[in-house]
Image (cartoon, helix red, strand yellow):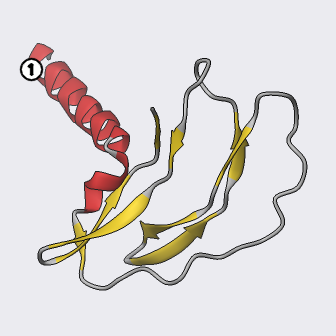
Amino acid sequence: MKRKLLAGVFVLAGAVFTGCAGGYSYGYVSYAPPAPQYGVVGVAPGPGFVWTEGYWGWQGGRYAWVPGRWARPPRARAAWVAPEWRHEGRGWRFHQGHWR
């Protein structure tokens, strides 16, 4: 019984940590992403919000557009580093956006 419970915990933990891997979970894509899409940004929902541009993600074996959004920086003077696709050797690899 304990062995089955422990195995279940490891499977669940593996699924959770795989989900946290973000942009690195699918490795390389053999072809470049399409050109970015642009639209109206609108007004910030409040003071201190920063617009994070949309980007092409990888979902279901193809590129899928992830729209931009307003976000509040986690700390004062934090700067948003946009996500990007980089050509690396055998294909294109996604690098997640993050606060610096």
Q: In the orientation shown, which residue stands out farthest toward the top?
A: 2
* Residue drawn where x is 37% and y is 48% of the image: 22
Position of 38 relative to 84 (above/below)? below
Give neighbour class at mark 1: few <14, some 14-19, many 20+ (Cα, 10 Å). Answer: few
Q: In the orientation shown, which residue stands out farthest toward the front?
A: 77
Position of 29 relative to 84 (above/below)? below
On the image, the x and y values in percent for residue 16 come to 34, 35
Q: Quadrant of the N terminus?
A: top left
On the image, the x and y values in percent for residue 5 come to 20, 20
The image quarter containing residue 20 is top left
* Residue drawn where x is 49% and y is 84% of the image: 34
Say left or right for 92 vs 6.
right
Nearest the viewer among 69 and 87 is 87
On the image, the x and y values in percent for residue 18 come to 28, 43
Question: Mark 1: which amino acid?
Answer: Arg
The image quarter containing residue 70 is top right
* Residue drawn where x is 58% and y is 18% of the image: 75
Nearest the viewer among 92 and 8 is 92
Say what secondary structure mark 1 lies in: helix
Say left or right for 73 vs 90.
right
How many callouts does the rendering have? 1
Residue that badge 1 annotates:
3
Position of 82 relative to 94 (above/below)? above
